Amino acid sequence: MPMEYSEKVMEHFMHPRNVGEIENADAIGEVGNPQCGDIMRLYLKIEDGKITDAKFKTFGCGAAIASSSMLTELIKGKTIEEALKVSNKLVEEALGGLPAIKRHCSLLAEEAMLSALENYSKTHNIKIDLESKKRKMNK
Ligand code: FES
């Protein structure tokens, strides 16, 4: 049986938002899934604690591209604290659901955001509560 994708997933896969790189990005996060080999790179522009721009490059499956696209839409304009509340579940819901075997693709988007914010906290010497977020992810 062919896999069922929602219209929203198809739409974000066919016309992904915010594809590309940000020159002089304030934060870059890159994660990969060793099982499928897909890689996601996320670029963030952060001003006064707010994510003013987000772009991505994803070398991966359609669900990963749709998830990256949705993630950038969800976190743009949010403060770092607000962005930390954006989970892969939220990305998935906003996409109208993903087939069960494609859930890990949305997780890649959440991990890319965490990786970018982790790098940001290191390079800007600010404290971001990533630990509690990671604990939630592992549940
Ligand atoms: Fe690898 Fe979707 S199959 S992220």
Image (spheres, rainbow, N blue to C red):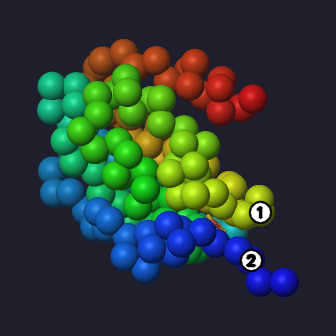
> Of all residues shown, which one is farthest toward the right?
1
In this rendering, the answer to whether 8 lies above or below 73 is below
Give the side of residue 105 with respect to residue 130, left or right: right
Q: Quadrant of the C terminus?
A: top right
The picture places residue 128, in percent across and down from the top left corner, at: 40, 20
Image coordinates of residue 85 in percent, x first then y, are 48, 29
Tag shown at residue 101: 1
Residue drawn where x is 54% and y is 38% of the image: 87
Task: Kindly identify which residue carries mark 2.
Answer: 3
Secondary structure beneath label 2: loop
Q: Nearer the viewer, residue 82 or 107?
A: 82
What's the residue type where badge 1 is placed? Ile
Is 68 left, or right, of 21 in this rendering? right
Residue at 58% across, 73% down: 61
Q: Residues within 10 Å of mark 1 (few under 14, many from 20)?
A: few
Amino acid residing under circle 2: Met
Drawn side of residue 10 relative to residue 124, left or right = right
**Residue at 29% of width from left, 34% of height from top?**
78
Q: State if disc 1 and disc 2 touch (CB < 8 Å).
A: yes
The residue carrying pointer 2 sits among few (fewer than 14), some (14 to 19) or many (20 or more) residues within 10 Å by Cα, namely few
Query: Please, is residue 113 above or below residue 103 in the view?
Result: above
Q: Residue at x 60, y 69 (%)?
A: 6
Question: Picture coordinates of residue 129 (x, y %)?
Answer: 46, 18
